[in-house]
Image (cartoon, rainbow, N blue to C red):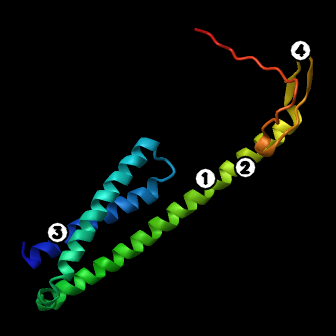
Amino acid sequence: MTTQELVTELKSVTYDLMSLLERETTDLRTLSHGEYEQFISEKSALSMQYEQLVVKLRSRGDELRAMPEEDRAELRELQAEFQETARRNMTALQAAKATNERMVQAIVRAVNDKAKEDCTTYNRSAKTSKATLGGYGRTMNKSGGAFSVNETL
């Protein structure tokens, strides 16, 4: 493959990767788990292809420098656009992660608070009593506690 063909391929892959990152950033809140997994798969494949092309082109530095300045300027502009798109995508992903972590923490706090209020146990004589709570809202083992498992076949 010639250097010019590698540059053309790199431009194509970069545009595809930028498009995917922009769609991911835009659709992050509405994607189902399966759709997001597909995005991850596509992003991994395009990222690997992008990296391989960049490595090949770097090994052909003399040929790249011999290309017309117009083509090199276009490639530099495209790389700058790609870096900006990747930065926006990373910011959106970090924000989504932080939001999910806060949501999970709020749920854990709510469950723990509710468990402290309403958690009861049964003793051997089938009388109820307040449970002693351990970490994360779990009841601690108390001697004499009884339990049953609902087994329906």
Q: Could you say whether the residue bearing mark 4 is in a helix, strand or loop?
A: loop
Foreground residue, 74 or 127? 127
The residue that appears at 24% across and 64% down in the rendered structure is: 49
**Label 4: which residue?**
126
The disc labelled 2 sits on which kind of residue?
Ala
- Out of 132 and 56, give the one closest to the viewer: 132
Label 4 sits on what residue type?
Ala
Is 107 rendered above or below residue 126?
below
Separation of residues labelled 2 and 4 (CA atoms): 34 Å
In front: mark 2 or mark 4?
4
| Mark 2 crowd level (few <14, some 14–19, many ≥20, 10 Å Cα) | few
Instruction: Point out residue 27 in the picture as x, y percentages from the top left corner.
Output: 45, 53
**Going by the picture, which residue comes out furthest to the top?**
153
Q: Mark 1 points at which residue?
A: 100
Q: Residue 78's x, y, as percent?
A: 29, 77
Task: Please give the name of the residue rendered at 14% of the width and 73% of the height, measured from the top-left corner.
Answer: 6
Mark earlier in primary sequence (2, 4): 2
Q: Which amino acid does label 3 sit on?
A: Glu
Please report whichever mark, 3 or 1, sits nearer to the chain's N-terminal start: 3
Separation of marks 4 and 3 at Cα, in angstroms: 74 Å
CB atoms at circles 3 and 1 under 8 Å apart? no
> Regarding mark 3 in the picture, which secondary structure is present there?
helix
Query: What residue is pinned by disc 3?
Result: 9
